[in-house]
Amino acid sequence: MNKNLIDEMLNKSQEAFLMAIEIYNKPTISYRLEGFAFFIYKEIAFFG
């Protein structure tokens, strides 16, 4: 794989992980567990 592509995918994976944590920590979001699960799954799907 192209190094630039790998770096871009790694960056997106890290952003998805941070988004999951941020969503889970917001008490005002009604479906925060579902949002957390979505973004964690996205992160795992990229780099497991």
Image: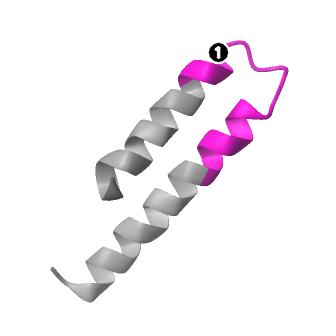
Above or below: residue 3 compared with residue 40: below
Point out residue 45 in the picture as x, y percentages from the top left corner.
Answer: 31, 47
Residue at the (63%, 52%) spot, across then down: 18
Residue at x 28%, y 76% (from the top left corner): 5
35 sits to left or right of 26 = left
Q: Which residue is mark 1?
A: 31
Asked whether, in this view, residue 9 is left or right of residue 24, the answer is: left
Task: Classify the position of the N terminus by image quarter.
Answer: bottom left
Please tell me which residue lies in front, 25 or 3.
Answer: 25
Is residue 32 highlighted in magenta?
yes
Q: Residue at x 31, y 84 (%)?
A: 4
Q: Position of residue 6 (x, y in %)?
A: 30, 76
Query: Which residues are the magenta region?
Result: 18-34
Kindly give the residue lying farthest to the left in the view shown.
Answer: 1
Magenta segment: does it hold 30? Answer: yes
Residue 37 against residue 1 in the figure, above or below: above
Query: Please, is residue 39 above or below residue 13 in the view?
Result: above
The quadrant holding residue 20 is: top right
Q: Quadrant of residue 28?
A: top right
Circle 1 sits in a helix, a strand or a loop, which is it? loop
Q: How many marks?
A: 1
Query: Which residue sits furthest top?
Result: 30
Residue furthest out toward the front: 48
Write the residue at 47% across / 31% down. Answer: 38
Q: Who is closer to the viewer here, 37 or 2? A: 37
